[in-house]
């Protein structure tokens, strides 16, 4: 959800993010991850924007990832191969405050190889960087609110958004700010500050709902397939054991445990024991 949300913000307001992350409000266009390589990449979290002089690669993270430094090196080499003449600026933005040392890791090092990238810990950023920038408004509540409380920052964000004349932009920023605020504030506080109607009317909110429905449907399909595999296994496992077949190898390959097979057998109450 937060990957899609941050993608919407940076792709809709690229100049605001360029000013924040590059230090200048240059015009950036979206770059598809498919242009980098035919090999699989984590396109769900990869955000790429480009101009004639620079490629901006941003990853927003709600949690730490031990593979992050190598991933940044991997993406850098792909970008360098594709755009050898352009400057490549890579940034990892951590949204949620954590004491993990991984949020301070800003380089990959192995033998003689060293690659550096920028890391932004949002809770260390002053809120004034975001409160007066339209595209960055939803991130303000995640920044350092001192001396204000997060609720006060969110109220200030809501006031700024309410002043936006364009209905679609206003609704989308309302939903974005409310959803990001959910990482830090209680739901009741958020709904007191924002109008629920504006959230429901936003395209980003509808996209997230649709994504949730699709994930639910996919989980249902996968669960059904697993039940089918379990049902077949209950029938053939006694025969496989009779011929001393390594049953655990088969179960591991199918992503099923013996406990799941036995539980299914108990539910069916067919009297088979293993």
Image (spheres, rainbow, N blue to C red):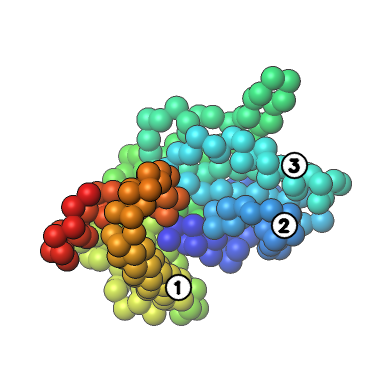
Residue for badge 1: 207
Residue 158 in picture, x, y percent from top left: 36, 64
Q: Which one is in front, 64 or 213?
A: 213
Residue 77: mark in rendering:
3
Are there few (<14), some (14-19), or many (20+) residues within 10 Å of tag 3? some
Q: Is residue 124 visible?
A: yes
User: Alpha carbon of mark 1 to alpha carbon of mark 3: how far?
Assistant: 32 Å
**Looking at this view, is 226 or 109 the one in front?**
226
Contact (CB < 8 A) between labels 2 and 1? no
How packed mark 1 is, by other alpha carbons closer than 10 Å (few <14, some 14-19, many 20 or more), is: some
Q: Is residue 7 left or right of residue 216?
A: right
Callout 1–callout 3 Cβ contact below 8 Å: no
Answer left or right for 203 relative to 91: left
Is residue 141 visible from the viewing direction of this image?
Answer: no
Q: Nearer the viewer, mark 1 or mark 3?
A: 3
Mark number displayed over residue 38:
2
Earlier residue among tags 1 and 3: 3
Residue depicted at x 72% and y 25%: 113
| Front tag of 3 and 2 | 2
Residue at 66% in and 23% down:
110
Q: Tell me which label, 3 or 2, sits earlier in the chain.
A: 2
Mark closer to the observer (2, 1) = 2
Is the residue 124 above or below the residue 82 in the image? Answer: above
Q: Please report the residue visible at 42 percent of the width from the left and 54 percent of the height from the top.
A: 254
Numbered disc 1: secondary structure: helix
Q: CA distance from mark 2 to mark 1?
A: 27 Å
Quarter of the image where one finds residue 76? top right
| Cα distance between the residues tagged 3 and 2 | 14 Å
């Amino acid at each position: 959800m937060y990957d899609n949300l941050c993608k919407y913000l940076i792709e809709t307001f690229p100049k605001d993010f360029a000013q924040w992350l590059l230090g200048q409000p240059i015009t950036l266009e979206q770059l598809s991850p498919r242009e980098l390589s035919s090999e699989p990449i984590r396109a769900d979290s990869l955000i790429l924007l480009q101009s004639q002089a620079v490629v901006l690669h941003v990853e927003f993270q709600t949690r730490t990832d031990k593979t992050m430094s190598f991933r940044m090196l991997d993406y850098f080499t792909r970008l360098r191969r594709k755009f050898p003449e352009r400057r490549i600026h890579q940034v990892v933005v951590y949204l949620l405050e954590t004491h993990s040392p991984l949020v301070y890791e800003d380089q990959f090092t192995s033998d003689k190889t060293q690659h550096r990238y920028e890391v932004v810990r949002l809770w260390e950023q002053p809120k004034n960087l975001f409160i007066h920038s339209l595209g960055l408004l939803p991130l303000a509540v995640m920044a350092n609110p001192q001396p204000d409380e997060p609720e006060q920052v969110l109220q200030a964000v809501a006031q700024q958004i309410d002043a936006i004349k364009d209905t679609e932009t206003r609704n989308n920023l309302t939903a974005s700010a409310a959803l990001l605020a959910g990482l830090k504030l209680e739901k009741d506080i958020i709904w007191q500050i924002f109008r629920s109607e504006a959230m429901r009317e936003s395209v980003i909110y509808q996209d997230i709902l649709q994504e949730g429905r699709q994930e639910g449907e996919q989980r249902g399909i996968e669960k059904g397939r697993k039940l089918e595999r379990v049902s077949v296994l209950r029938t053939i496992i006694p025969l496989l054991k009779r011929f001393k077949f390594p049953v655990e190898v088969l179960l591991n390959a199918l992503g099923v445990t013996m406990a799941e097979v036995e539980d299914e057998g108990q539910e069916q109450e067919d009297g088979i024991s293993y």
